[in-house]
Amino acid sequence: MKSAPHLYSGPLYAGLTVGILGGSFNPAHAGHRHISLFALKALGLDRVWWMVSPQNPLKSTSGMASLPERLAEARAVAAHPRIEVTAIETALGTRYTADTLAKLQRRFPKTRFVWLMGADNLRQIPRWKHWNRIFDSVAVAVFARPTYSLGALSGKAAQRYTRRRVSVSGVKGLARRRRPAWAFLRNSLHPASATAIRQARAAGS
């Protein structure tokens, strides 16, 4: 299997369960890898895709490394046969997660997807365009992050879908559950921060 999923690789992923970790990856770091390895085991995933966004609509372009730079660094950090780095949104022509997932499901009709995100994004996801469609279309796995977890679980999204939350004991079957279905995973915390890495690099330049 190629290391980067593309528009015509649907047959290669037929029957697989794939976790999607989307983001700017500016830059990718050990925390992303830590979460991905945890997700592979805890959720029973076959693959994790790091979906590197050309440009997050909610983030400034200031200080954003080029897409080729971010992809190259993500591949170097991932360094695992079941973590695959892709910029497939470029080919799909999408900017928003809800639209991306809809197109991916058309391109990969026999693949089960799980959206992976940190607790910080669970708190802010109501700001995302058509955010309800994300929960309606794929299972969602949320990972603990330092300082964010408590606020995320009291936020709008968690409260709206509180009856659809899956217990930790049932997360290996999360991708097969009727949507909406989401889980909050108590993973060990990792201190890596893309913001801190950028600041350290800027200070050393």
Image (cartoon, rainbow, N blue to C red):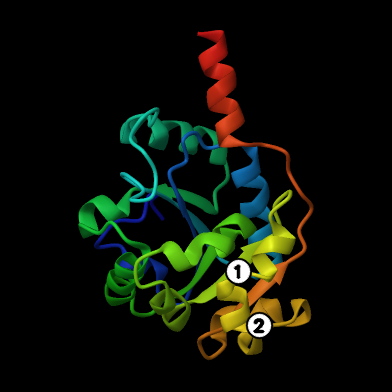
What residue sits right under mark 2 in the picture? 165
**Amino acid bearing label 2:** Arg
Q: Position of residue 117 (x, y in %)?
A: 56, 60
Which residue is tagged 1? 141
- Residue 45 in sight from this viewpoint: yes
> Is residue 137 placed above or below 123 in the rendered structure?
below
The answer to which of 42 and 147 lies nearer the viewer is 147
Work out whether mark 2 precedes mark 1 in sequence or the reverse, and give the earlier one: 1
- Left or right of 100 in this view: 138: right
Q: Secondary structure at mark 2?
A: loop
Residue at 41% from the left image edge and 55% from the top image edge: 1
25 to the left or right of 10: right
Q: Which mark is residue 182?
A: none
Residue 138: % across, % down? 46, 77
Instruction: Please tell me how crowded label 1 is: few (under 14), some (14-19), or many (20+) other residues with Cα within 10 Å.
Output: many
- At which x and y percent is residue 43? 65, 70
Vertical side of 65 occupied by 40: above or below = below
Q: Nearer the viewer, residue 111 or 81?
A: 111
Q: Is residue 196 left or right of residue 136?
A: right
Q: Nearer the viewer, mark 2 or mark 1?
A: 2
Count neighbours of disc 2 (C-alpha within 10 A) and say few if under 14, some if 14 to 19, many if 20 or more: some
Query: What percent of the width, then of the height, locates residue 70?
Result: 41, 34
- Whether tag 2 and tag 1 are in contact, CB under 8 A, the answer is no
Inspect the image, locate mark 1, and give the three-letter code of the amino acid beneath it.
Ala
